[in-house]
Image (tube, rainbow, N blue to C red):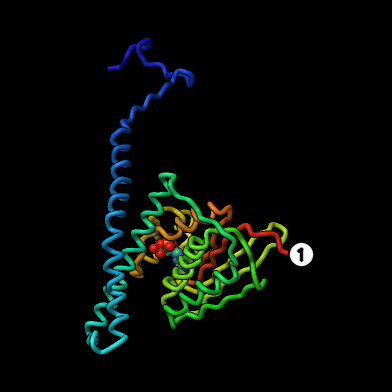
C-alpha cells in the first residue's frame, strides 16, 4: 500500500547523517599481543638448540676432513652437510624473526663504528662468490676507501641479503654487478646491486619491503624464502639515516640501490 505523503520518510540532509560504527578491537589486540609473545618466545627458545646442532654439524665435518680416525663415509658426509645447511637456515630465520620482534618492541640498537665500506663490500662479495659458480660477482668501487660510521655487522647483513637475493632469483646464473660510489655533495655512499634474473612483477613492486611479502613469480618458481629480508634491509638502512629502493622488470632483471651517510672526504 502507498504511504500517505506526510509519512514518506524524508531523505536526511548531509548534516544530519551520523554513522556510528562500533567494532570490538580488544580481541584483535589480544591476538596481536599473543602473536608477538609467541614469536619472541619461539625465537629465544629455538636459538640455543639450533646453534648447538649447527655447531656440531660444523665440527663433525671439520674433524672428518682432518683425519681417518674421525672419518665419515660419503653418505654420512653428505647428510651431515645437509644437516648443517638446514640448521643454519633455521638459525638465520630465527635471527631475522628476533630482529623484527626487537625492532617492533623498540629494543633494537645499532652499534656504530668507523668502517671502510669498500673493504666491507669486497669481503661480503668474496664470501658469497664462494657459494656459487653459476654467477659472476663483480665489484666496481670508485674510491679506494670510503669511511662511514655504521654498524658493520648490520651493513654486511644488508649487502649479504641483497646479494644472495640477486643470486637466488637468477636461477639461470649470470653476472651480478655491485657498484659503490661516493656522492661528494651529499656526503653519501651509494650502493647498486644489479642482476639479470627473473625480475619483480609490477603488481607486487609497491609492497615489496613489507613484512612477509614475496612476489608471485618467485613463489611460482618454487624458490624458498620468508619475505623478511627486504623488510629488515629497509629498517636497517633507514635507521642509519639512508635510503633504499629498487627498479625491476619481470624477465629482465632487478637493480637494488641504497645510500648511507659517510664521512666528509679527507682533503687531498
Ligand atoms: P625472501 O627472499 O626470503 O623471500 P626478501 O624479503 O629478501 O625475502 O625478498 C622479498 C621478495 O622480493 C622475494 O620473495 C622475491 O619475490 C623478491 N625479490 C627480492 N630480491 C629479488 C631479486 N633480486 N630479483 C627478483 N625478485 C626479488
Q: Is the residue at mark 1 in contact range of ligand 1, meaning its CB lies under 8 Å from it?
A: no
Outermost residue toward the top? Answer: 6
4 vs 218, nearest the viewer: 218
Q: Secondary structure at mark 1?
A: loop
Image location of residue 59, percent across then percent down: 30, 76
Q: Is residue 1 visible?
A: yes
The residue sitting at 69% across, 57% down in the picture is 186
Task: Please state the quadrant of the image where ligand 1 appears.
Answer: bottom left
The residue sitting at 40% across, 54% down in the picture is 99
- Picture quarter containing residue 259? bottom right
Q: Quadrant of the C terminus?
A: bottom right
Q: Which residue is mark 1?
A: 267
Q: Is residue 208 visible?
A: no
Outermost residue toward the bottom? Answer: 68
Relative to 12, is 192 on the left or the right?
Answer: right
Image location of residue 184, percent across then percent down: 71, 62
| Above/below status of 75 relative to 1 | below
The residue sitting at 50% across, 72% down in the picture is 124
Relative to 193, is 95 on the left or the right?
Answer: left
Image location of residue 165, percent across then percent down: 44, 68
69 vs 115, nearest the viewer: 69
Image location of residue 234, percent across then percent down: 50, 55
Amino acid at each position: 500500500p502507498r504511504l500517505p505523503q506526510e509519512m514518506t520518510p524524508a531523505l536526511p540532509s548531509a548534516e544530519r547523517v551520523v554513522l556510528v560504527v562500533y567494532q570490538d578491537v580488544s580481541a584483535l589486540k589480544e591476538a596481536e599481543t599473543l602473536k608477538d609473545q609467541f614469536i619472541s618466545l619461539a625465537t629465544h627458545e629455538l636459538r640455543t638448540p639450533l646453534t648447538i646442532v649447527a655447531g656440531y654439524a660444523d665440527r663433525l665435518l671439520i674433524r672428518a676432513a682432518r683425519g681417518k680416525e674421525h672419518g665419515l663415509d660419503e653418505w654420512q658426509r653428505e647428510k651431515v652437510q645437509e644437516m648443517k645447511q638446514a640448521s643454519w637456515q633455521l638459525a638465520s630465520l630465527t635471527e631475522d624473526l628476533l630482529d623484527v620482534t626487537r625492532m617492533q618492541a623498540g629494543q633494537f640498537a645499532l652499534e656504530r663504528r668507523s668502517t671502510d665500506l669498500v673493504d666491507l663490500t669486497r669481503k661480503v662479495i668474496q664470501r658469497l662468490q664462494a657459494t656459487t659458480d653459476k654467477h659472476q660477482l663483480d665489484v666496481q668501487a670508485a674510491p679506494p676507501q670510503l669511511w662511514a660510521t655504521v654498524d658493520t655487522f648490520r651493513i654486511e647483513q644488508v649487502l649479504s641479503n641483497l646479494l644472495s637475493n640477486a643470486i637466488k632469483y637468477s636461477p639461470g646464473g649470470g653476472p651480478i654487478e655491485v657498484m659503490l660510489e661516493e656522492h661528494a655533495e651529499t656526503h653519501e655512499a651509494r650502493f647498486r646491486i644489479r642482476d639479470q634474473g627473473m625480475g619483480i612483477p609490477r603488481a607486487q613492486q609497491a609492497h615489496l619491503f613489507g613484512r612477509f611479502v614475496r612476489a608471485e613469480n618467485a613463489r611460482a618458481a618454487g624458490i624458498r624464502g620468508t619475505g623478511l629480508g627486504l623488510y629488515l634491509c629497509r629498517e636497517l638502512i633507514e635507521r642509519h639515516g639512508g635510503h633504499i629502493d629498487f627498479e625491476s622488470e619481470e624477465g629482465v632483471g632487478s637493480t637494488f640501490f641504497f645510500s648511507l651517510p659517510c664521512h666528509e672526504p679527507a682533503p687531498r
